[in-house]
């Protein structure tokens, strides 16, 4: 009681400008005020310049007719479409090259990363040259190189040359490799493929639930269940049922080579291929080094123990090494996925109509520079945040849980 009374009677020390806490607050307020002042100055300057050029601010221009064509589109588009539709086409094109690039770069990177640690001297050295060469060449230079190679007349013919007697022969009788792209057959649009997609999603959920059940069964009884092959079966069955129920479409559209154009089928343009190859090869070199470092982080005793009990090297890699290495691999791998997505903006160098290229066209036609740049920033920010959230969720799922 005496100590409490003494403590209560001690007056509080008055705050001084020389206190570190007070100075910290003051400096934060000063810096915030300076930043706010700079932002206000830039904004007012932008508004004044736009008013001087009779350019109105806002996003009303998105509803106006675009008036320009786009060579590649995953959705219906024409010059009569709006600027909003044009930007959406650019977003889909960016998303397409990012998703395909991430999948291919991951597959190549993991394969090369494992091969870097091969006990075969020649394989290890070749993969080391692959990694050290490609990651030290600027990605823009690689994209331009692939575009030049694909469109070179020394390597690929033009479509018209396929009409010449005894000219180039298509691959498998229906796939044409030309300087204007790769032309290949594709199934014609039908609601049955939507049914197959729904079935595929249901199959993925079913395979995931089956894997969880198999894991609980293994923990409780020690009995193994072939969850992988059973999951593949569930996936295939659900997709097949969805395809059958919605009409089972089988009609295929084949490319037809004419003197002036190619009709039918599906086309992969040189611009898309060059961008995809450049981003995939460049990013895979970094992913390979990340995989290599992740594998090396696993104690050698784990590998030796697997070999001691007679496990195959492939089983040791799949069941022992990679599950532990993923905890080291995932964080830097996320950064590489983000870099690949953002590097897709370099497509403007080869003419692929992705988000930045189309936004630049809308900007030059309308003069709405702040709005166009803001849309690009929001789209890339949304893609990056979504990717980070998914990868962080997966990283948290595979972390070791201490008891």
Image (cartoon, grey):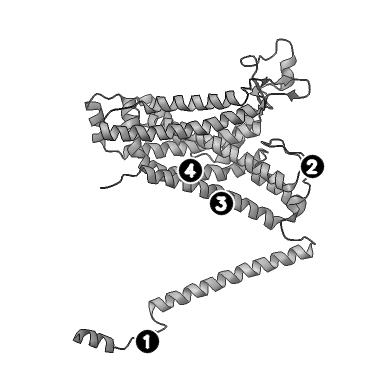
Position of 341 relative to 249 (above/below)? below
- Could you give the CA–CA distance between mark 3 and mark 4, rounded to whole angstroms? 15 Å
- Could you give the CA–CA distance between mark 2 and mark 1, rounded to whole angstroms? 71 Å
Measured as percent of width and height from the top left, residue 164 is found at 74, 13
Is residue 401 found left or right of 235 in the rendered image? left
- Could you give the CA–CA distance between mark 2 and mark 3, rounded to whole angstroms? 29 Å
Secondary structure at numbered mark 3: helix
Residue 197: name its quadrant.
top right
Measured as percent of width and height from the top left, residue 207 is found at 44, 31
The residue nearer to you, when weighing 121 against 225, is 225
Earlier-in-chain disc, 2 versus 3: 2
Residue on which the image places disc 1 = 14
Which quadrant of the figure contains the N terminus?
bottom left
Earlier-in-chain disc, 3 versus 1: 1
Do labels 1 and 4 touch, CB within 8 Å? no
Crowding at dot 2, Cα within 10 Å, few <14 / some 14-19 / many 20+, comes out as few
Residue on which the image places disc 2 = 80
Of the two numbered discs 2 and 4 in the rendering, the one whose residue sits closer to the viewer: 2
Position of 16 relative to 250 (above/below)? below
- Could you give the CA–CA distance between mark 1 and mark 4, rounded to whole angstroms? 52 Å
Do labels 3 and 1 touch, CB within 8 Å? no
Earlier-in-chain disc, 3 versus 4: 4
Residue on which the image places disc 3 = 381
Secondary structure at numbered mark 2: loop
Measured as percent of width and height from the top left, residue 91 is found at 63, 43
Is residue 296 found left or right of 46 in the rendered image? left
Secondary structure at numbered mark 1: loop
Query: On residue 336, which mark appears?
Result: 4
Crowding at dot 1, Cα within 10 Å, few <14 / some 14-19 / many 20+, comes out as few
Earlier-in-chain disc, 2 versus 4: 2
Residue drawn at 45 percent across, 44 percent down: 391
């Amino acid at each position: 009681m005496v100590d409490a009374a003494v403590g209560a009677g001690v007056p509080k020390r008055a705050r001084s400008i020389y206190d570190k806490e007070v100075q910290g607050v003051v400096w934060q307020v000063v810096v915030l005020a300076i930043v706010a002042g700079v932002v206000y100055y830039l904004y007012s300057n932008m508004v004044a310049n736009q008013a001087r050029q009779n350019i109105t601010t806002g996003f009303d221009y998105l509803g106006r007719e675009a008036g320009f064509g786009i060579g590649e589109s995953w959705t219906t588009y024409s010059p009569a479409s709006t600027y909003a539709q044009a930007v959406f086409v650019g977003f889909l094109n960016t998303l397409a090259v990012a998703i395909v690039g991430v999948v291919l770069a991951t597959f190549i990177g993991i394969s090369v990363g494992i091969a870097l640690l091969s006990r075969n001297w020649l394989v290890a050295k070749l993969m080391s040259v692959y990694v050290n060469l490609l990651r030290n060449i600027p990605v823009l230079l690689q994209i331009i190189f692939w575009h030049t190679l694909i469109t070179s007349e020394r390597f690929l013919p033009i479509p018209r040359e396929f009409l010449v007697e005894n000219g180039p022969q298509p691959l498998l009788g229906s796939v044409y490799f030309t300087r204007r792209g790769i032309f290949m057959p594709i199934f014609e649009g039908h609601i049955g493929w939507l049914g197959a997609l729904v079935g595929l999603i249901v199959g993925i959920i079913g395979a995931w639930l089956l894997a969880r059940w198999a894991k609980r069964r293994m923990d409780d009884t020690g009995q193994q269940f072939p969850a992988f092959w059973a999951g593949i079966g569930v996936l295939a069955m659900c997709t097949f049922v969805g395809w059958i129920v919605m009409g089972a479409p089988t009609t295929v559209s084949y490319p037809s080579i004419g003197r002036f154009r190619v009709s039918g089928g599906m086309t992969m343009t040189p611009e898309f291929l060059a961008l995809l190859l450049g981003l995939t090869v460049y990013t895979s070199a970094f992913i390979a080094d990340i995989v290599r470092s992740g594998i090396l982080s696993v104690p050698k005793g784990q590998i030796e123990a697997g070999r001691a009990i007679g496990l195959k090297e492939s089983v040791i890699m799949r069941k022992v090494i990679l599950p532990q290495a993923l905890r080291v691999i995932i964080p830097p791998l996320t950064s590489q996925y983000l870099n690949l997505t953002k590097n897709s903006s370099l497509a403007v160098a080869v003419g692929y109509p992705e988000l930045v290229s189309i936004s630049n066209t809308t900007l030059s036609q309308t003069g709405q520079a702040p709005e166009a740049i803001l849309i690009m920033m929001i789209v890339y920010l949304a893609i990056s945040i979504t990717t980070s959230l998914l990868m962080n969720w997966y990283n948290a799922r595979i972390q070791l849980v201490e008891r």
